[in-house]
Image (cartoon, rainbow, N blue to C red):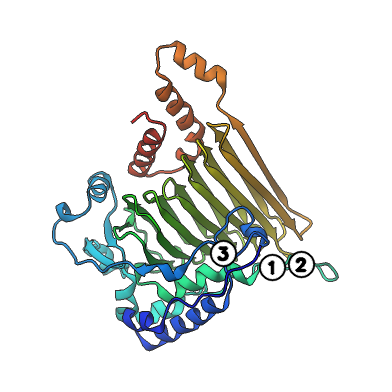
Amino acid sequence: MTQPPTQHPFSEELIVATGGPEWLTAKRRESLALFNGLELPSESVEAWKYTQVSHIDFSELHPHAKRDAVTDVAQLPASVQKRLNGTDVGAYLVLDGPDVVYRTELPAELRAQGVIFTDLKTASEQHADLVQQYLYSVVPAEVPDDTTIAAPGTTPSKSPDPSEGKFSALAAALWTNGAFVYVPRGVEVELPLGAFRVMSDAGSYTATRTLVVTEANASVTFIDEQDSEALRGTYAIGAVELVVKDGARLRYVSVQNWGEGVTHIQRQRGDVGRDATLNSLVVTMGGTLSRTEMQSYLRGQGSDSEMLALYFANKNQHFDHYTLQHHAAANAHSDLLYKGVGDDQSVGVFSGMIKVDLNAQKTDAYQKHRTLMLSTEARNYSVPQLEINANDVRCSHGSTTGPVDAEQLFFLKSRGIREEQAEKMLVTAFLEDVLTRVPLKSVVEYIEGIIAEKVGAA
């Protein structure tokens, strides 16, 4: 397929307008130059084979309009108010497009222990040393080279196509704000922290970034939620960097429920140290086109990564999930379970890779993808993959796709349950083994509510 001419729609004036320290401005300029030099990924790029983005014309987009801060929760969008009334986070930020419009303070006892929770723009000024040390270290502007370390004389895996970094470069150059969390060595944060992101400007783009750093033997849970009304021709570009030092524990939850017309493209990546644990949950419910990459780099011996996801695509939604479990050290464990539902004329894509490096002996890795199809017009593409270069490992992968069990549906209907409610019950039961792994009651209830709306049983 012929690529459109390379577009240079973003000027350095946008970088200057974002402000920040000199080192950050220099990095933004480098990232913008990289973005301008890269083509959009085409179907010839294996990782983007089933998701076409060549139609995107960045020159038609404008930056999301700025928003003023509010002093009362009642001044926030109704969807955010509803979530805040039902959430159990200990502190949170609310961002509307590029701006923090509302926030709550971190409890005093956590501040006294050195925990930092603020927006990333503020952090880059007030905690410059920390931000400069970790920003772009896990999700750089260019696509990470995740080539497997292979045995001498053998051919390692092919490096990613440079175009796969197009959106990462954009996110690195033009991010306006996001969330920053820093938990010092040995500190345990019991209540979750969270960021609630909304957009309200159709035809715009917003670029946000999350940076969570858990030092050795620290622990924290962070929840990223995205929500909007229908916004035609609107783009949400993002990057999430998760630093999990030796012995630390981090639980990261992303819930994407953008309105119709939004294109969501985000790369999430965790760097997991020795005996550390990263639990991630990706929930995709909204937007018209969504591409989410979740990658775990198991750097340290004894590291552990649990990667969970659930999604429900209906109408003409197109959801693409790309995952990587990269075992670079011995005695590490990873477990991936992605479950999805497809209805109407929707399209679901899953491409998952387990990579095991040469010296990553005693690797224990699992990958499962399951899809429930509610419509004969919906499509699903599933590509589970293994690349193993160690000889003492236990790895498995698999994928299944199938319709709702007609007998189960008939049984429920025969008991007087209307079809929409019966279908909702079967869908919820199908997703239950993911939901039961999530110890966040308010998040689970929120997800179940979205599922009910999708099947018309709310």
Q: Does 422 appear above or below 340? A: above
Q: Which residue is mark 2?
A: 156
Q: Residue at x 52, y 73 (%)?
A: 140
Mark nearer the viewer, 1 or 3: 1
Mark 2 touches mark 1? (CB < 8 Å): yes
Tally of numbered discs: 3
Q: In which quadrant of the rendered image does the C terminus lie?
A: top left
Extreme residue toward the bottom, this view: 22
Mark nearer the viewer, 2 or 3: 2
Q: Earlier in the sequence, mark 2 or mark 3?
A: 2
Q: Earlier in the sequence, mark 1 or mark 3?
A: 1
- In the image, what residue type sits under mark 1? Thr
- In the image, what residue type sits under mark 3? Arg
Q: Residue at x 38, y 33 (%)?
A: 452
For the residues marked 2 and 1, what is the alpha-carbon distance in whole angstroms? 7 Å
Q: Quadrant of residue 62?
A: bottom left
Helix, strand, or loop for circle 3?
loop
Circle 3: is it few (<14), some (14-19), or many (20+) Cα within 10 Å? many
Q: Earlier in the sequence, mark 2 or mark 1?
A: 1
Q: Residue at x 16, y 55 (%)?
A: 75
Q: Does 281 appear above or below 177? A: above
Mark 2 touches mark 3? (CB < 8 Å): no
Q: Quadrant of residue 10?
A: bottom left
